[in-house]
Amino acid sequence: MLSRDLMPLVDECHALVREEHPDLTGMLVLDLEILGDEEIGGVVNTLEPGKGNEVAEPALLECVRESLLATTLPPPEQGGRDAISLSMRFDPPAPE
């Protein structure tokens, strides 16, 4: 469920950054901490590149960070806080 909410944002950031960096490929690994709030749901508290991250493009990381910090997600099931790791592979663009 969380991936379904986050992936469109990450895909949009990737598309924007790839306009300037068409060779942007590799595994993006992000470690997130989500805080639960009874009134608004889950909010991303921290977002950092995770172990195994291969994408160091600052523009992509900043776009993803800004998008996720402005997003309300389902609250952690246990309440309080939850730490997750999100990973996705960016392949080279298909030949035209």
Image (spheres, rainbow, N blue to C red):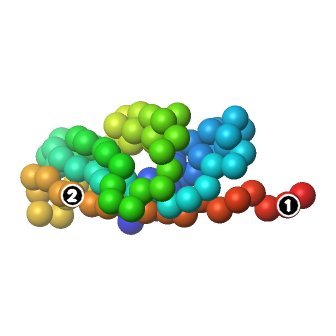
**Which residue shows up at 43% across the image and 62% down it?**
87
**Which residue shows up at 18% across the image and 47% down it?**
35
Q: CA distance from mark 1 to mark 2?
A: 38 Å
Dot 2 lies on which element? strand
Judge left or right: residue 59 versus residue 67: right
Q: Nearer the viewer, mark 1 or mark 2?
A: 1
Badge 2 density bin: few <14, some 14–19, many ≥20, Cα 10 Å: some
Judge left or right: residue 14 versus residue 47: right
Upstream in the sequence, badge 1 or badge 2? 2
Above or below residue 78? Residue 59 is above
Residue 25: x percent and y percent?
61, 55
Q: Which residue is mark 1?
A: 95
Above or below residue 88? Residue 75 is above
**Which residue shows up at 52% across the image and 34% down it?**
59
Badge 1 density bin: few <14, some 14–19, many ≥20, Cα 10 Å: few
Q: Quadrant of residue 84?
A: bottom left
Q: Amino acid at mark 2?
A: Ala
Q: Quadrant of the C terminus?
A: bottom right
Question: Does any portion of residue 73 appear in the rendered image?
Answer: no
Q: Which mark is residue 83?
A: 2
Dot 1 lies on which element? loop
**Which residue shows up at 18% across the image and 57% down it?**
82
Residue 24: x percent and y percent?
63, 49
Q: Quadrant of residue 40?
A: top left
Q: Amino acid at mark 1?
A: Pro
Whether label 1 touches label 2, CB < 8 Å: no
Residue 95: x percent and y percent?
85, 60
Judge left or right: residue 18 versus residue 42: right
